[in-house]
Amino acid sequence: MSGLETSLATLSNGLDVFPTSLDLWIDYLTLLCSNHNDEQDHIDKIRSEFETAVGFVGHQFLSHPLWDKYIEFEKSQNDNLKVLNILLRVVRIPLHQYARYYQSLTEIKDKVPLESIMDLDPELHNIIDSNPDQDKNTLLTNHISRICTDTYTYVTKIWPYEAKVAQLTSFTLIPLDPSVVSTWEEYLDFMIAKHTASPSELNKKQVISLFERSLVPTALETKLWLKYIKWVSSSLPSDTDLLQNIYHRAVNLYVPVDIYSIRLSHALFLEINDKSSETINELYLNTIKSNPAEPAPIIHYVQYVTRVNKNSKRTADWLNQILNSRFKSGKTETELTIYEQRIADLLNDKTAGVLVAELIKILWYQCKDHTALKIHFSFYSKQESLFGSVPFWSIYYKYQRSLGDRTSLSKVVAFIKNSSALPLTLINAILLDYADYLQQNPEATASTYKRVLELEYDAYNALHYRLVDDKQRKRFKGESGHPSVFIEKPTVTNTSIGQLVDRFKPSSLPTFKNVEKAALPIEYAQNE
């Protein structure tokens, strides 16, 4: 008996982890039924387990072995009424073997009083009550026939999809071919549309069952988890337990930690449903820790803190505390809280720039504190670790542009162009935007347009301007592709290329420099 109990406990533990496994349920119930006794408590337990199994996997297309075993068990108890009740349920579900259950139902209906059948089937009860002049047995036969026809139609529609996914049901650690996900998604879209058109209990259970099946082979993919969450949120918004269960499995069991979108969605769900702030903080901080190079988790966390504080100034002070601990050698007005210290410890050069940018946005958009903004811009623009921060320099440029102070803006642009460590694509975008800004200025002069041309030239020749004033850059230019051989080539000094020239006046004759050096001996550059 100890061996039996161990086997049952093992299977039960497996079902606790994976309750949507049809094979596990069949093995568990087979073992349970083969060793049951006639005690009522034991029989009731088996029935309860069958009902639990049906709830989890009874709507799977190939779940007929489970239903067969359930029917077989009730037949062994010589209870035709319970057998009939099972058949009335299963005959409505679009299963591969639905026709067998229709045949069994037509055979057993004559062994049970009609009144008992009516009690089990409210729909039949209404039909008979609405047609008092017609023969009740005929109405029963027609009712069962109509159910079978509806099920046949249902099966016919889903059969092509089932044929496609039949070999796509196994979990694997190997990255999936995109066609696997798209095949399941196509089937899900069909079932969701069917539920939308007719939101019956049957269609709801079919959609849930299909999602659970699809998530076995695609458990490591985010797409279907998010699709499942979206459908439940829109179609079953009150079922928060189901949503929490989906999130729990996705976030804690299956989806890799570096995929943060579903974790941010989970945090928002917990917040909406008034869950513990400690749980939400832990989720955000763990997501930030697992994605140290991603700005989105820390931005969402700041937004969450702002919503909790219900006061932008408090959030700005909170951010200032954390940033001071990093940039001002731990100098803070008050001691950091546990969560403030944890987020401070998680900061790196990239995420610190994100946090500074969020502080700037709050002070600018919400608090409108321009005095504080100038202080922060002055301080953080000098921090070498932020020279490559896209969020910080982007918001700095936008702020100076919005003020209309061309002198300050030109200084920011000059720093971005010549001294920053920003990506060239961003530098080029800022230069072109600055050129547009200059052209839109109503006081633009010829010198302004000359500056515009220079900016556009710099933007489209990204490697030129970064080192144009650098001593080593000049040496490279002189070497002209021949290392250590320095040549000062003759150069036109009054070129008209890139200059604003009066179209009605001919250009002046060219003048040159270094012409006299053309015949001099080669000068070999000294090692530096």
Image (cartoon, rainbow, N blue to C red):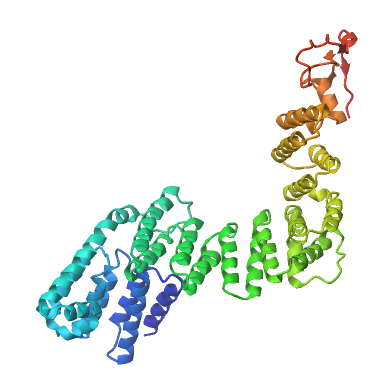
| Location of residue 68 (image quadrant) | bottom left
Quadrant in which the C terminus appears:
top right
Q: Position of residue 95 (x, y in %)?
A: 26, 65
Q: Is residue 396 left or right of residue 111?
A: right
| Location of residue 366 (image quadrant) | bottom right
| Residue 515 higher or lower than 73, as above or below | above
Judge by depth and name the residue closer to the eye, 114 or 309.
Answer: 309
Q: Position of residue 426 (x, y in %)?
A: 71, 41
Q: Name the residue: 37% across, 66% down.
A: 209
Q: Name the residue: 39% across, 82% down.
A: 5
Judge by depth and name the residue closer to the eye, 61 or 459.
Answer: 459
Residue 100 visible to the viewer: no
Q: Is residue 88 left or right of residue 447?
A: left
How many numbered circles does the render carry?
A: 0
Judge by depth and name the residue closer to the eye, 207 or 50.
Answer: 207
| Residue 187 higher or lower than 472, as above or below | below
Q: Position of residue 64 (x, y in %)?
A: 26, 68
Residue 233 visible to the viewer: yes
Q: Position of residue 493 (x, y in %)?
A: 85, 16
| Location of residue 121 (image quadrant) | bottom left
| Residue 442 higher or lower than 176, as above or below | above
Q: Name the residue: 79% across, 41% down.
A: 416
Judge by depth and name the residue closer to the eye, 471 or 40.
Answer: 471
Quadrant in which the N terminus appears:
bottom left
